[in-house]
Amino acid sequence: MTLMFDNISLKSSLLPCLEEAKILSYHRTRLGGQIFHVLLVSQKEAFVKIGKSYEKYEIIEEYKNLSLLQGSLPVPEVYDYITTDSQAMIVLEKMPGFPLNSMISLLGRNHSLSIIKDILDALKSVPNSVKNNFEIASKQELKNIKSLIDNNLINKDNFMKGSRDLDPVAAFNKIQNDLNNHNTQVLTHGDLCLPNILVTIGKWSLIDWGKGGNGDSARDLSALEGSLKRNIDEQAFPQVCEMMNIEMNITLSQKLEIYKLMDLFWYNKSL
């Protein structure tokens, strides 16, 4: 299999770091992007992400976010990056470790939850000198959601099954109005689910930063809530909140619902 970018083979001199790279595996993402696991000529393993349309925007954002985060959090190094009018591509360091959801039985429940607490603390501790360079994450996501609606790319029937009968336009208007009352001063990952947390002996790292940026901590808590329910149990999320001294109140519940509503657009996007 040959890596292709805008119909150009990446075996060419388009990106020197990929010359003579060996493809180890390949898969498509839920939104239609391509991810190649490669072995570079330097014998380093890397991931190559190629995306168009909405995946293009996520790759562009991931490049910007990772460039800002180097040295502040354990995140992949960007080996190379290129964008055209139609596509974007990024070559990323393969971080050591395994997804946290695959390690729970080995690490144990309490240790797994303590890792999540450490990550939430680390996000809060990123210095303002770094954090102030990030954009408000929800602005770009709202633009992308609006484009999905305008281009009739939402499976309306499936969407309304999960939105309490709100159609996509009504849901978008509700999200837009509610986000005006959300905090925008916290660095958020944007998709803080267990598969995006890699763990190895005594270390963790965060991958997939395409939705990262400043926002409300409820954005990450929303993703965590669903991921913890799927991978551990119903009590794992309340336990994390207790560990973080986060009060489970009506305001937080309403914010969590808004971010779940945002995610529904991507789960019901027509490919």
Image (cartoon, rainbow, N blue to C red):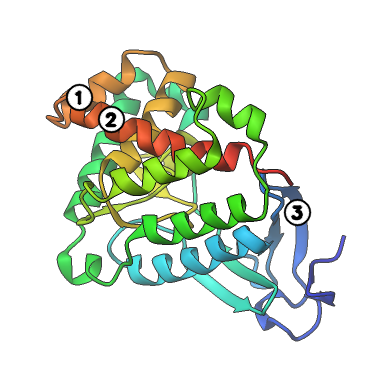
Camera-near label (3 vs 1) is 1
Q: Residue at x 49, y 27 (%)?
A: 163
CB atoms at circles 2 and 1 under 8 Å apart?
yes
Q: Residue at x 67, y 79 (%)?
A: 85
Callout 2 crowding tier (Cα within 10 Å): few <14, some 14–19, many ≥20:
few
Label 1: how many Cα within 10 Å (few below 14, some 14–19, many 20+): few
Question: Does 163 sit left or right of 9 as displayed?
Answer: left
| Residue at the outermost top position | 234
Of the image marks 2 and 3, the number of the one nearer the N terminus: 3
Separation of residues labelled 2 and 1 (CA atoms): 6 Å
Q: Nearer the viewer, residue 174 or 47?
A: 174
Could one spot residue 142 in this view of the protein? yes
The residue indicated by pointer 3 is 24
Circle 2 SS class:
helix
Q: Which residue is mark 2?
A: 254
Residue 15, x across and y down, in percent: 68, 81
Quarter holding the N terminus?
Answer: bottom right
Q: In the figure, residue 40 lies in which quadrant?
A: bottom right
Between label 2 and label 3, give the one nearer the viewer.
2
Q: Quadrant of residue 69?
A: bottom left
Tell me if residue 5 comes above or below residue 126 in the rendering: below
Label 3 crowd (10 A; few <14 / some 14-19 / many >=20) = few
Residue 209 is at least partly visible in this image:
no
Residue 57 located left or right of residue 34: left
Residue pictured at 19% horizontal, 30% vertical: 251
- Give the residue furthest to the right: 1
Q: In the rendered structure, which amino acid carries the disc numbered 2?
A: Gln
Residue annotated with mark 1 = 250
